[in-house]
Image (spheres, helix red, strand yellow):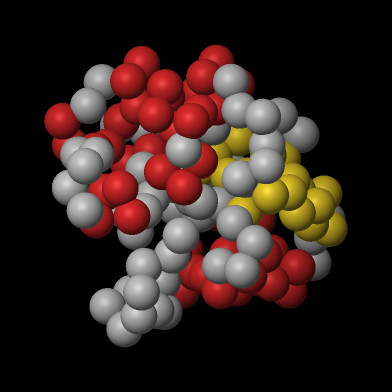
């Protein structure tokens, strides 16, 4: 199986489920803290490839929930600049499989890594609407 680097937010129950899903599928997972990674816009951009800019964001981020940041009204350069400063805005998990990168589990290479488990099982936050937003 594959060795996968996963950038996640420590303490996020959903990220923990996602990582466990990858491990259950037989992969070796190297976990990194998305908040401590020294991000640069050009590197971060490689995870989003041809995704629409509004899908780059973690919709549960406090600055999005408060309305301070509107993912539907922002250009790529501005989005990346915000994410470099505030990694909570970045859609998680970020996945790196030998240089093939993606954000979230609903695109390749993540889909192939899950061994039949649908991304819907792991993309939806179990706490959404039931508790304080992730920070």
Nearer the observer, 106 or 134 = 134
Q: Residue at x 67, y 29 (%)?
A: 38
Q: Is residue 15 left or right of residue 5?
A: left
Q: Residue at x 30, y 32 (%)?
A: 52
Q: Is residue 84 left or right of residue 125?
A: right
- x and y percentages locating residue 94 in the rendered image: 58, 44
Q: Is residue 83 left or right of residue 113?
A: left
**Is 133 situated above or below 112?**
below
Q: Residue at x 26, y 21 (%)?
A: 75
**Is 85 situated above or below 34?**
above
Which of the 4 image quarters holds residue 99? top right
- x and y percentages locating residue 92 in the rendered image: 51, 51
Which of the 4 image quarters holds residue 35? top right
Q: Quadrant of the N terminus?
A: bottom right
Residue 105 visible in the snapshot? yes
- x and y percentages locating residue 22 in the rendered image: 69, 64
Q: Residue at x 68, y 37 (%)?
A: 37
- Please state the total of marks drawn on the protein image: 0
Q: Is residue 62 left or right of residue 111?
A: left
Nearer the observer, 52 or 90 = 90
Residue at the far bottom: name it. Answer: 130
- x and y percentages locating residue 135 in the rendered image: 46, 60
Residue 114 visible in the snapshot? no
């Amino acid at each position: 199986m594959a060795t996968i680097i996963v950038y996640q937010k420590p303490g996020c129950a959903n990220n923990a489920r996602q990582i466990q899903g990858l491990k259950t599928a037989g992969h070796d997972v190297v976990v990194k803290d998305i908040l401590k990674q020294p991000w640069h816009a050009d590197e971060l951009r490689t995870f989003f490839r041809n995704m629409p800019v509004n899908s780059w964001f973690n919709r549960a981020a406090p600055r999005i929930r408060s309305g301070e940041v509107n993912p539907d009204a922002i250009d790529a350069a501005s989005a990346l600049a915000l994410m470099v400063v505030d990694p909570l805005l970045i859609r998680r998990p970020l996945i790196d499989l030998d240089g093939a990168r993606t954000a979230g589990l609903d695109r390749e290479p993540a889909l192939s890594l899950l061994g039949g488990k649908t991304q819907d099982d792991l993309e939806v936050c179990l706490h959404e609407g039931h508790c304080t937003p992730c920070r």
